[in-house]
Amino acid sequence: MTLPNMPLPSVSLPGLLAVHAHPDDESLFSGGVLAQHAAAGARTAVVTTTWVEGSHRVTELARALKILGAGAPRLLGYADARVPESAPGRPRFVDAPLDEAVGALVGHIRAVRPQVVIAPDAYGGMTGHPDHVHTHRVTALAVRAAGLARLFPEAGDPWQPSALYLATHPHSAAEEVGGRLGREGTPTGAFYVSDDAWITTKVDVGPWLPQKLAAILAHRSEVERGAAPGRIAALPPDVQRRILGTEWYIRRDLVLRGAAETALSA
């Protein structure tokens, strides 16, 4: 199946808030769209649900966001499910009270006031990491709650984003992308991918690939330990372009059709 290739925009792009689980997820999964929107003059921001100020990974996150034009880190401050030292004394994100996490994210949505919110898909991306899955759940609740004045009134004035875009990978890309980004020996069937028919938005981020790649590599600790940024760093430039030059999303409208257009790429 051939996915529709969305043309580059000829009009201004909407404000965008990306919500991701870990430092480096923002660059890996939506770095191209963040750079695209920032280059067009749109306000962009990123909320990261795990890790805290003062940690080496948040320092790296700040560098990556500067490259992407996405402002300073915004943190919920919970611990990574597999790295308790990521937030000493704080609960794991997956164990935190749901209302607490949703309310914290609502505060960021109301502060940024984006038209578009990005989050991981329901599978939590290709790896199915529990923090990614929970980030999807919390974001799906928060984008609705943010527009309701009587929910979390302490989090600021209500604001309703127009659309939620779920960052994903289609089945047709599993072998190429998953085979390069996944750990060696992981079978293609082990990746959590979406049916091609579910994809609503395919964005060619080739023009912003230098920023996306630089932001990925800004996560130096992940490069050095051989995680996904490290595997990307070791690839030839033509392969980097193939696996990073497209981003896929599943759009979920949050307002009635007929409102201002909020497609990532018009």
Image (spheres, rainbow, N blue to C red):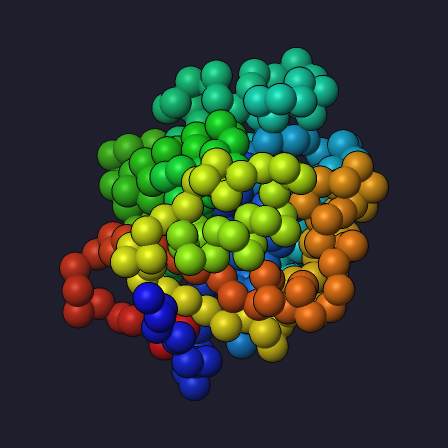
| Nearest the eye: 264 or 154 | 264
> Relative to 89, does residue 79 appear above or below in the rendering?
below
Name the quadrant containing residue 212: bottom right
Residue 228 image position (x, y, % from top left): 67, 45
Left or right of 135 in this view: 233:
right
Left or right of 126 in this view: 153:
left
Question: Which residue is rendered at x = 73% and y = 68% of the image?
Answer: 237
Name the quadrant containing residue 65: bottom right
| Nearest the eye: 146 or 39 | 39
Quarter of the image that includes the C terminus: bottom left
Residue 69 image position (x, y, % from top left): 64, 63
Q: Taking the image as drawn, is residue 234 in sight? A: yes
| Nearest the eye: 63 or 167 | 167
| Nearest the eye: 43 or 249 | 249
Residue 116 image position (x, y, % from top left): 39, 58
Left or right of 59 in this view: 112:
left
> Relative to 87, does residue 45 appear above or below in the rendering?
below
> Relative to 97, does residue 196 appear above or below in the rendering?
below
Residue 123 image position (x, y, % from top left): 40, 38
Q: How many numbered discs sit on the rendered protein?
A: 0
In this view, the residue farthest toward the top is 89
Question: Which residue is rendered at x = 60% and y = 67% of the image?
Answer: 242
Q: Taking the image as drawn, is residue 74 in sight? A: no
Quarter of the image that includes the N terminus: bottom left
Question: Which residue is rendered at x = 52% and y = 24% of the image?
Answer: 93
